[in-house]
Image: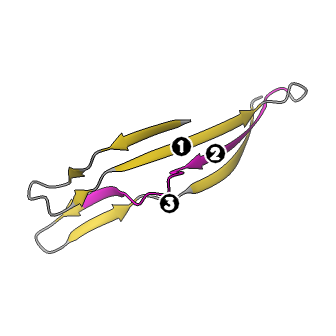
Amino acid sequence: MNGNYNSGFPFDVAGSIRQKEYALLNAELSFEPAKLNGLRMSLWGRNLTNHDYIQGALPTNFADLVSWAAPVTYGLTAQYRF
């Protein structure tokens, strides 16, 4: 499990695009069965706080463009090492 906190910041000098404060929480739980050597199963979750935050921004003279990060995301990963 990991998390981080950001107190907010401007993406440009003028401050027209400003990220508000946010906290993120990610977690992963993995299992490696002893009888199946090389197999690893992981259940994971990203942005568990489901906070909207800006992933990137491009301020221009005509318009300010922003790209939002993914919302809460869950998944299951299976890996096998030979």
Residue under circle 3? Answer: 71
State if disc 2 and disc 3 touch (CB < 8 Å): no
**Mark 3 or mark 2, which has the lower sequence index?**
2
The amino acid sitting under disc 1 is Asn
31 on left or right of 23: right
Q: Please say if 1 is above or below 61.
A: above
Q: Which residue appears at 42% of the width and 58% of the height?
A: 69
Q: Where's residue 20, x and y in %?
A: 28, 56
29 on left or right of 69: right
The amino acid sitting under disc 2 is Trp
The amino acid sitting under disc 3 is Pro
Outermost right residue:
35
Mark 1 surroundings: few (<14), some (14-19) or many (≥20) residues within 10 A: some
Pick the residue in front: 22 or 57.
22
Stretch in magenta: 37-57
Q: Which residue appears at 54% of the width and 57% of the height?
A: 72
**Mark 2 or mark 1, which has the lower sequence index?**
1
Q: Where's residue 45, x and y in %?
A: 60, 48
Q: Please say if 41 is above or below 46.
A: above
